[in-house]
């Protein structure tokens, strides 16, 4: 028979007995066994819905992550049940496992974890039993308190090596990586506390005991202000932890905090000689690494009191003594401001040190020393600086001041010339724009005039066909239709009409946007109007021969001579100006290309084309 359970359980916080409820508490040993008479703890739930293992004495031992408690029915099958009882906690809602880890009580830790095996005995068998027990143990070990800390975190923080080793057997990869509310995991807090004894098995057992479930990037996790475990250990001065971290992952040396400072900055500031030496042995160029303020490790070291750290950094790279931060402060300026007399003396001994280097606000180290409150340290610093030739900024050698003054004057003169050139270019641009405006207006006027003339030509030519020279017959046929003069009149009058109409169509249809395109259109329509004028002249002369008749033929010849001379002269002059204008354009383009942009300003083709006093297109 199953061993009978007690009728009630004791509330461990209030000391009260709880009545037994058969539907909620079941015997977890369905079959008789030699251990049947042994009191066995029961598995219930906490008030948060988490599984709580309670002993038969009524004392709650641990709390797991699972949201359900595991019960066994009378048939031996598992089923989920919920029972809410109060959880026994510490100050931060700690479980018994947290408290045992905090005390370093490895026996209590083993007992708590071992009772899970005893509690589950007889519920399952074989691989299922092992898997279920392992899952519950992992949940118990990975349980966090109100601070977000696991029992493993607590043991690592307190430096209890044996508890850490014991818990690592049951934790998971996620449990190892869990961070508390401060953003620290177990590895980080171990590095922070400097527990060398915890750290060594921690790194090894994670790989060997947890079978590579340890996150490879765990050593690169960051805490507050983006601090890595290496930076934390270097700041605290835990040399063994620094060596171990670098041996596992040398790339940690390159990682920095949010402000740009890395491990060597913090180690130098705190004066940890062995850590600074270890970091420089790994990478001597770390001495030149700067943070977001432009400060090197030497800037940080001279703020402290360790002369040995300063020597180490200067041995790695003596030239860093003159590296300024973004405010122009060298290590000498910082050491003077911090009243580090011995470090100032160490810096002054270097041949690379410029004792009169200026900060961005034009102060030397002596200016800074003079501004400090009077004390024994400041007096000693002023004496040392003066002994090495330090002077105030306003007492620096005159040639340098004169050179600075000359450079300033040159800058002002160059600025004045550039300003004058800018104004000149602006004026030239204004003149060029005005010229382009005038040119555009001229082309527009010419275009409008051509349109009016073309309409007039078309009107005259159209009307001439209905009032032909010589008159018409009664049937409307021209009397002189068979004569040669009439045929010449008819043909050239038609050409003049159609040419004029073509010009009108172009003028009312084509839209010009650029000055160059307008000029080209005007060039074409001007030549068409020349043709229309010539044709109209020929038509008029031929009609004159018909009108005057054979007796007065001399009058027609006279008109022909006058018209021919005038038209030839005008068209010849216009042709001359067109050819001359094109030659001028070609010459100016050739000169422009030969200068290769030597002019301070450039004019477009249109600008250069308006130079002649008179031209034709």
Image (cartoon, helix red, strand yellow):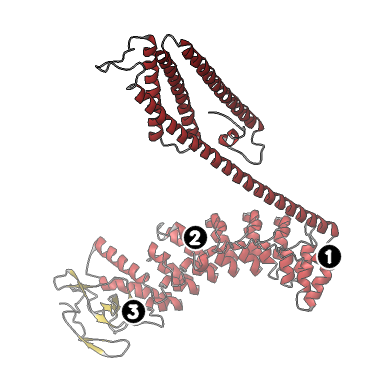
> What is the spatial separation of the Cα atoms under label 1 and label 2, in whole angstroms?
52 Å
Of callouts 3 and 1, the N-terminal one: 3
Q: At 75% across and 75% down in the image, what residue appears?
A: 372
Vertical relation: 220 (above or below) 1:
above
> Is residue 396 something that shows in the picture?
yes
Q: How many numbered marks does the figure carry?
A: 3
Classify mark 1: residues with Cα within 10 Å, few (<14), some (14-19) or many (20+). Answer: few
Viewer-side label of 2, 3: 2
Residue indicated by mark 1 = 395
Residue 487: name its quadrant: top left
Residue indicated by mark 2 = 220
The answer to which of 456 and 353 lies nearer the viewer is 456
Give yes or no for contact between labels 2 and 3 (Cβ–Cβ under 8 Å): no
Vertical relation: 145 (above or below) 447:
below
The answer to which of 46 and 595 lies nearer the viewer is 595
Q: At 86% across and 66% down in the image, what residue appears?
A: 387
Could you tell me residue 211's position as x and y percent? 40, 57
> Is residue 41 something that shows in the picture?
no
Q: Which mark is residue 61?
A: 3
Q: Secondary structure at mark 3?
A: strand
Q: Is residue 441 left or right of residue 614?
A: left
The answer to which of 438 and 319 lies nearer the viewer is 438
Residue 385: name its quadrant: bottom right
Q: Is residue 465 left or right of residue 578?
A: left
Image quadrant containing the N terminus: bottom left
Vertical relation: 243 (above or below) 496:
below
Of callouts 1 and 2, the N-terminal one: 2
Q: At 74% across and 52% down in the image, what residue appears?
A: 413
Vertical relation: 592 (above or below) 211:
above
């Amino acid at each position: 028979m199953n061993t009978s359970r007690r009728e009630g359980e004791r509330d461990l916080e209030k000391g009260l007995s709880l009545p037994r409820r058969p539907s909620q508490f079941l015997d977890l040993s369905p079959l008789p066994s030699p251990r049947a008479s042994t009191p066995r703890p029961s598995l219930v739930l906490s008030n948060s819905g988490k599984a709580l293992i309670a002993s038969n004495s009524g004392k709650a031992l641990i709390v797991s992550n699972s949201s359900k408690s595991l019960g066994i029915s009378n048939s031996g099958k598992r089923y989920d049940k919920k029972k809410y009882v109060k959880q026994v906690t510490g100050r931060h809602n700690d479980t018994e496992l947290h408290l045992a880890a905090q005390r370093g009580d490895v026996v209590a830790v083993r007992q708590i974890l071992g009772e899970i095996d005893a509690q589950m005995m007889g519920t399952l068998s074989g691989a299922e039993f092992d898997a279920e027990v392992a899952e519950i143990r992992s949940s118990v070990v990975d349980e966090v308190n109100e601070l977000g800390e696991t029992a493993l975190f607590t043991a690592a923080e307190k430096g209890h090596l044996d508890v850490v080793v014991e818990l690592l057997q049951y934790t998971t990869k996620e449990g190892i990586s869990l961070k508390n509310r401060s953003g620290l995991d177990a590895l980080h807090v171990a590095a922070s506390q400097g527990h060398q004894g915890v750290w060594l098995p921690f790194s090894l057992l994670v790989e060997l005991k947890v079978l590579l479930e340890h996150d490879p990037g765990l050593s690169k996790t960051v805490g507050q202000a983006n601090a890595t475990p290496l930076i934390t250990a270097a700041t605290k001065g835990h040399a063994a932890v620094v060596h171990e971290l670098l041996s596992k992952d040398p790339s940690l040396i390159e990682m920095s905090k949010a402000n740009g400072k890395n491990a060597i900055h913090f180690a130098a500031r705190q004066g940890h000689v062995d850590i600074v030496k270890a970091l420089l042995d790994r990478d001597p160029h770390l001495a030149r690494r700067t943070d977001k303020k432009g400060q090197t490790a030497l800037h940080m070291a001279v703020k402290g009191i360790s002369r040995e750290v300063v020597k180490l950094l200067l041995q790695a790279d003596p030239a860093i003594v003159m590296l300024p931060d973004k405010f122009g402060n060298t290590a000498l300026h910082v050491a003077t401001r911090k009243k580090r007399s011995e470090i100032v003396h160490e810096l002054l001994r270097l041949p690379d040190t410029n004792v009169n280097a200026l900060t961005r606000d034009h102060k030397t180290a002596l200016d800074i020393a003079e501004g400090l409150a009077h004390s024994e340290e400041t007096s000693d610093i002023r004496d040392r600086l003066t002994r090495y030739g330090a002077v105030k900024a306003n007492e620096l050698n005159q040639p340098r001041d004169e050179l600075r003054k000359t450079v300033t004057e040159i800058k002002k003169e160059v600025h004045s010339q550039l300003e004058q050139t800018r104004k000149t270019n602006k004026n030239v641009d204004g003149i060029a724009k005005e010229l382009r405006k005038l040119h555009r207006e001229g082309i527009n006027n010419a275009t409008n005039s051509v349109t009016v003339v073309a309409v007039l030509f078309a009107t005259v030519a159209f009307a001439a066909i209905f009032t032909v020279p010589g008159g018409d017959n009664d049937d409307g046929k021209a009397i002189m239709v068979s004569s040669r003069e009439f045929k010449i009149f008819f043909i050239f009058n038609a050409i003049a009409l159609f040419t004029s109409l073509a010009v009108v169509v172009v003028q009312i249809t084509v839209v010009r946007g650029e000055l160059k395109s307008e000029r080209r259109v005007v060039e074409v329509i001007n030549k068409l109007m020349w043709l229309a004028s010539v044709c109209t002249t020929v038509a008029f002369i031929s009609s004159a021969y018909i009108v005057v008749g054979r007796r007065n033929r001399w009058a027609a010849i006279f008109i022909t001579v006058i018209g021919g001379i005038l038209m030839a002269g005008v068209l010849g002059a216009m042709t001359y100006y067109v050819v001359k204008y094109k030659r001028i354009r070609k010459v100016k383009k050739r000169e422009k290309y030969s200068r290769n942009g030597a002019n301070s300003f450039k004019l477009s083709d249109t600008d250069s084309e308006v130079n002649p006093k008179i031209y034709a297109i």
